[in-house]
């Protein structure tokens, strides 16, 4: 898809925003211009709308980044929320699903999942990808065929992707030690850290470098201290310097208990001892932490990604978000299992969790919440410039209705706390209009296709 919709000359794009959320505050009548590579070259408030320029009504926000996604979990939406159970029984349902996808069907599903994200205002996604091999663990002819399916899906939907290729070597950790991979999880494994690093290097070679605003980046992940044994962690740390590296951390108390029983340390301390806590690392969930864990994460500049809708749905608990931020951890946000795809719900969930946990309001200012969902999340994806409407940043614009039933009457500075994904009417990704009048320009309304795809997945 070309950069259609921007009406600027010389291959660039120009947009006029009725109101825009700029780094210095909300401003009126903002004219922005982007170079052909999709990077903003001018941001000028107080300019009357020029004739013929693309007008964005309402309030224009910077593009959101989804810092934690498992695209295939979308197939579980509306199918696991009854009947109780725990995180672990939910995981059994997820494993059954994992056995049903191949590169073609995963491509068809993921493009629609990513289209839903773009419709909601996400312009970039960190895909935490561990569905690597064929059922049983056999390699596809291209051992990165499933990752390639995700990259193609993101390109179809017009969302930038950081493909976090996950190291996943064991089937779990309990007081007796690590369990081998088994059953549906055999697809996740590469055997050992060296073979995983070899596949990662091959993926690097397959993904073209993308200039100033790459459509795809390759990052890495440690599934968790449950799935990567302690003696493999230093090799992972050494082989991934300079890349975004994500890790599920202390989502459930059982992970902490097993880690303490086997290693005499918390998962956070174990990762720290292996050299994995550093700027560029993002700890996903970070729910059940000790005070020492918080100091280790903050002191090393390790980020923390909260997924409030998923953490609530799976009864994970509420992590110490304010303490982490105060200790020095940049906070980002993700939709994880996609029971909900709505960046506004996640940023509100971050603050609501704090209020429920502490009995106090206003733990994060609206600007801090928006920064977590935008700037900080882009940084977690390996993009230091994204998430701001400023010269040098990607031209990512999310225009939100201010006259909808949810948003009418809201002060612009508080709008992120009341808006929802359905209020997003236009989404510009890297200077290209992807959503207009609430419709995806390429994939239209992905709902009916998603329904067909999910019928096939579960048939
Ligand atoms: Zn996850």
Image (tube, grey):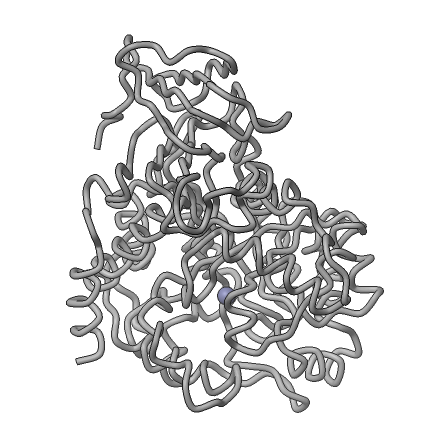
- Quarter of the view holding residue 218: top left
Percent of width and height locating residue 154: 31, 47
Can the viewer see residue 198 in this picture?
no
Q: Residue at x 45, y 32 (%)?
A: 60
Can the viewer see residue 173 in this picture?
yes
Q: Position of 206 compared to 364: left or right?
A: left
Toward the front, the furthest residue is 409
Q: Position of 55 compared to 285: left or right?
A: left
Pick the residue in front: 389 or 58: 58
Q: Residue at x 55, y 81 (%)?
A: 172
Percent of width and height locating residue 113: 31, 57
- Quarter holding the N terminus is top left
Relative height, residue 133 to residue 136 (above, below): above
Q: Position of 171 compared to 215: left or right?
A: right
Count of marks, rendered view? 0
- Quarter of the view holding residue 399: top left
Percent of width and height locating residue 89: 47, 87
Q: Position of 442 compared to 145: left or right?
A: left
- Quarter holding the C terminus is bottom left
Pick the residue in front: 391 or 300: 391
Percent of width and height locating residue 371: 60, 41
Q: Residue at x 59, y 43 (%)?
A: 414
Q: Residue at x 73, y 67 (%)?
A: 270
Relative height, residue 408 to residue 337 (above, below): above
């Amino acid at each position: 898809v070309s950069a259609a919709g921007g009406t600027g000359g010389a291959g660039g794009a120009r947009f006029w925003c009725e109101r825009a959320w700029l780094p210095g505050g909300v401003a009126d009548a903002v004219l922005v211009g982007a170079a052909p590579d999709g990077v903003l070259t001018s941001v000028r408030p107080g300019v009357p709308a020029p004739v013929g320029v693309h007008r964005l009504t309402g309030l224009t926000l910077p593009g959101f980044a989804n810092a934690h996604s498992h695209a295939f979990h979308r197939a579980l939406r509306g199918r696991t929320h009854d009947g109780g159970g725990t995180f672990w029984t939910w995981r059994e349902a997820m494993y059954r699903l994992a056995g049903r996808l191949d590169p073609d069907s995963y491509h068809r599903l993921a493009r629609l999942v990513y289209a839903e994200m773009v419709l909601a205002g996400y312009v970039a996604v960190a895909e935490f990808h561990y569905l690597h091999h064929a059922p049983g663990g056999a390699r596809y002819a291209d051992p990165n065929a499933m990752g390639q399916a995700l990259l193609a899906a993101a390109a179809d939907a017009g969302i930038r992707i950081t493909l976090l290729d996950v190291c996943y070597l064991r089937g779990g950790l309990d007081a007796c030690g690590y369990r081998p991979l088994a059953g549906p999880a055999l697809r996740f494994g590469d055997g050992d850290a060296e073979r995983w690093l070899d596949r990662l290097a091959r993926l690097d070679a397959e993904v073209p470098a993308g200039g100033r605003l790459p459509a795809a980046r390759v990052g890495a992940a440690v599934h968790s201290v449950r799935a990567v044994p302690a003696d493999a962690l230093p090799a992972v740390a050494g082989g991934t310097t300079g890349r975004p590296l994500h890790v599920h951390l202390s989502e459930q108390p059982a992970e902490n208990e097993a880690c303490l029983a086997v290693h005499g340390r918390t998962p956070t301390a174990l990762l720290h001892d292996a050299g994995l806590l550093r700027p560029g690392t993002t700890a996903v969930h970070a729910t059940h932490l000790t005070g020492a864990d918080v100091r280790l994460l903050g002191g090393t500049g390790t980020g923390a990604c909260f997924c409030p809708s998923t953490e609530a749905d799976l009864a994970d608990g509420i992590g110490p978000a304010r303490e982490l931020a105060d200790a020095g951890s940049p906070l980002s946000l993700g939709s994880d299992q996609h029971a909900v795809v709505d960046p506004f719900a996640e940023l509100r969930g971050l603050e609501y969790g704090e209020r429920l946990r502490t009995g106090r309001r206003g733990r994060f200012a609206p600007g801090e919440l928006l920064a977590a969902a935008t700037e900080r999340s882009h940084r977690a994806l390996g993009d230091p410039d994204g998430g701001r409407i400023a010269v040098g940043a990607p031209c990512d614009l999310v225009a939100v209705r201010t006259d909808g039933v949810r948003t009418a009457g809201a002060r612009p500075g508080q709008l992120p706390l009341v808006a929802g994904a359905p209020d997003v009417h236009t989404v510009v990704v890297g200077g290209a209009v992807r959503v207009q009048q609430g419709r995806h320009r390429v994939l239209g309304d992905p709902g009916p296709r998603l329904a067909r795809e999910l019928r096939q997945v579960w048939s």
